[in-house]
Amino acid sequence: MSLLRLTGAPSRRLALSIALAVSLVLIACQIPRCKPATLPDDGPPIATSREGAQQFLTKITTAAQSGTENNQITLTVTQEEVTSFLVVGAELADQLQEKASLENLEDLADLENLEGLEEIPGIQEWQNLAKQREGLPRIGLPNLSLRLGIEEPEVRFQGSGQVIVRGYARVRNLRQPARIVVAPKAEDGELSFDFVEGQVGRLPLPKGLFDLVAQALVRAILMGQDFAEITRIEVTEGTLTLSGRANAPS
C-alpha cells in the first residue's frame, strides 16, 4: 500500500488556490479599521537547526533500512526535526538548484567533488547522508510544493493527537498569518488527515482547500516516501510515531 494518498490537483493548483484564498483575505482587510489578524497562541516558536534537519533525514534512512531487513517500519520524529527539515532543507534545495542545478539529495551523492558548493553550510555532511542512502527509496528536498504555500512554516505535534501547521501566506508582498489544525490517521495503509479547523488572516480556511493542503502536509512530513503500509499513528506532545509493514521494493 502507498504511504501517501495523493488524490487531488497537482501542486500548481494548490498554489493557485491558496493564493486565491489569501487574496480574498487581503480584500477583506481593506475595509476601514480592519484589525490585524490574530491566531491562537500555540507556544513559543520552534527552534530550527541544520542538525535537526539532518537528524530527520537520518531517521527516515534508518526506518527504510530497517524495513528491508525485518519487514517492519517504526519512525518517530519530533516537531523540531520536521520543522528544521522544512526550513533548512528548503534553503539547501534553493542553493543546490542555483549553484549546481540539482533537484534531489541523491544527485548530491553523485558529485565527485563539491567545487562551487563549499559555501553551503554543512555541505559535506549532507553529501555523506546522501551516500548512505544508496539502494533506498529516493528522497527529494523540499521545493516550493513542499513548503505548504507558506513562509516560515512550523509543524507542531500536540498531546491531543492533532497536528498544527503555522506560517505566513504572502500575496502581492503582503503577509497574512495562517494556521491549520488536522488529525492524522492510518486509513487503508496510508497516512491521511481529517480537517479540524483552519484560518488564513481573519477568515476561516475554505474547506474546499483542505484536501490540497493535506496533500502538501503529508509530502512535507515524509518527503513523498512510499516504503511502508502504515498500520498505526501516534501523536504525543512534540512527537509523531508511524508504524507499519514495509512495502516490497518496486
Image (cartoon, helix red, strand yellow):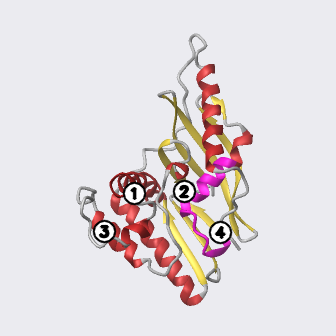
Q: Which mark is residue 3?
A: 4
Q: Which mark is residue 220?
A: 2
Q: Nearer the viewer, residue 221 or 117?
A: 117
Magenta residues (range): 212-232
SS type, badge 1: loop
Label 1 sits on residue? 101
SS type, badge 3: helix
Of the residues under marks 1 and 2, which one precedes in the sequence?
A: 1
Q: Quadrant of the N terminus?
A: bottom right
Q: CA distance from mark 4 to mark 2?
A: 13 Å
Residue reaching furthest to the top: 32
Residue at image coords 47%, 75%:
61
Label 3 sits on residue? 125
Q: Nearer the viewer, residue 29 or 142?
A: 142
Q: Determine whether, in the image, residue 163 is placed left or right of residue 175.
A: right
User: Against 146, is 70 above or below?
Assistant: below
Q: Position of residue 52 (x, y in %)?
A: 38, 61
Neighbours of disc 2 within 10 Å: few (<14), some (14-19), many (20+): many
Q: Decide: marks 1, 2 in contact (CB < 8 A)?
A: no
Q: Report the amino acid beneath label 3.
A: Glu
- Mark 4, mark 1: which one is toward the viewer? 1
